[in-house]
Image (cartoon, grey):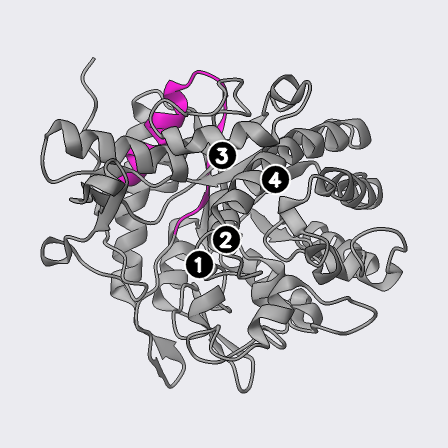
Amino acid sequence: MAPMTAPSPSELTKSDFGDDFTWGVAHASYQVEGAWDADGKGPSIWDTFTHKPRKIKDGSTGDEACDFYHRYPEDTALVKELGFEAQRFSISWPRVLPTGTGQVNQKGLDFYSRVVDECLAAGVEPWITIYHWDLPEALSQKGGWANRDVIGWFEEFVGVISERLGDRVKDWMVFNEPCSFIQGGYLSGVHAPGVRSFAKMLAASHHVNLCQAVGARVLRANVADSNVGTTHILTPMRTNRDSERHRRAAAAIDAFANRIFIEPNFGLGYPTEDAPLMQRVERYVQGDDMRDIVVDWDFFGVQYYTRVLVKPVPIPLLRGIPWISKDHKNYEITAMGWEVQPDGLYESLQRVHAYGKVDRLLVTENGVAVPDHLVGDRVRDPRRTAFYQDHLAEVLRAKRDGVPVEGYFCWSLMDNFEWAAGYVPRFGLTYVDYPTQRRVVKDSGRWFQQFLGAA
């Protein structure tokens, strides 16, 4: 049967997705919590990174962010008010283990216990991401993800969290987007900890892949009836010419951006055939690693924002290493400089499904940053509403074509600290006036409220 065309975005209804479809919003600890040194919390790599000059575009830090640490009850109530059934949030490793291992900071652990209880009291499912990029600075000083000892450090962290919260939380994501925090943090250096080393990037990639499996095993051992998955950003690689050189270039960057973090856990090894430079990862593989690295996920989280246009580098020395090009003349561009291409979400869902390794998919992040303006008590953001409608239409198309997609999480509940871009890009369904911490639901948030039947 030929693939279906996307349904009309304007005609979407919640019922189209089925009664068992999970609707949620997402955010991450460093991006929203603030309270960066409160109640015994240790410094994270992002605390260190943002306090250095010229690392963040607008010179900001996450010291206060959205003050979710103190405002989580009202923010959780907002999740419910907008009609969402689930709130995805992450755990700050140094808030719980200030030096990364050893002594537990009880006040930090108690905070996450209160957030879970608040979710359950509001009728909102807590979905926890174990790691969303804020490694303890103390562990970074020991090499961070490039140090193989991180496997044991991470195992300890997952154990502490799951033993305390596993009696109430059943839905878990081990990592958020390894590609982003490994290649951003250890290759390009634009993200914390700001390292630029191809060798350390490869070592960190392998160690994270091993930690995926370790985290899943610990969660299943400690949490009865657990639902354990992980998340990956999927970035389709496209070319504007159908030549062998262009296809090789696209395959090479696809191997480094997507496959290196997906296929080892599926038992498929590293995709070195399309990216010979990746063969160097083998120096970090020990003993039974490639057996132990395999994970039978309960679900797989697909995260999608845009695609990449690839072309070969016309220098013989760099043959096969691609350029990332742009085609901004033909597409709407977001405040992040990304092209809006909804069909890339359909392509990403189909791609993961085609592996035949996982029976349940969820879109665990999807959203857009556009210029927002608060006028009185209203933010009119029709571009964001249209973005969500267009992308939900692609989710439904995938579902109707047999892809087992069972949920959708918006990024994000509210505007927040957007890593190296600071506070200028706004992704939220809710506007945050940072000087006052006032929350104002945007028109896109009200659209979801109506769509989900909560208005």
Q: From the viewer's perspective, is the residue at label 1 or at label 2 nearer? A: 2
Question: From the image, which quarter does the C terminus lie in?
Answer: bottom left
Question: Residue furthest toward the top?
Answer: 1
Q: Is residue 319 visible?
A: yes
Q: Is residue 354 magenta?
A: yes
- Specify whether 361 is left or right of 167: left
For the residues labelled 2 and 3, the Cα–Cα distance comes to: 33 Å
Badge 4 is on which residue? 173
Disc 1 crowd, CA 10 A, few/some/many (<14, 14-19, 20+): few
Q: From the viewer's perspective, is the residue at label 3 or at label 1 nearer? A: 3
For the residues labelled 1 and 2, the Cα–Cα distance comes to: 8 Å
Badge 2 is on which residue? 83
Magenta residues, as a range? Answer: 344-366
| Residue occupying the point 40% across, 55% down | 448
Q: From the viewer's perspective, is the residue at label 3 or at label 4 nearer? A: 3
- Specify whether 185 is left or right of 74: left
Amino acid type, mark 2: Gly
* Occupied quadrant, residue 215: top right
Q: Position of residue 162 (x, y in %)?
A: 78, 40
Circle 1 sits in a helix, a strand or a loop, which is it?
Answer: loop
Badge 3 is on which residue? 261
| Residue occupying the point 27% across, 45% down | 307
Q: From the viewer's perspective, is the residue at label 2 or at label 3 nearer? A: 3
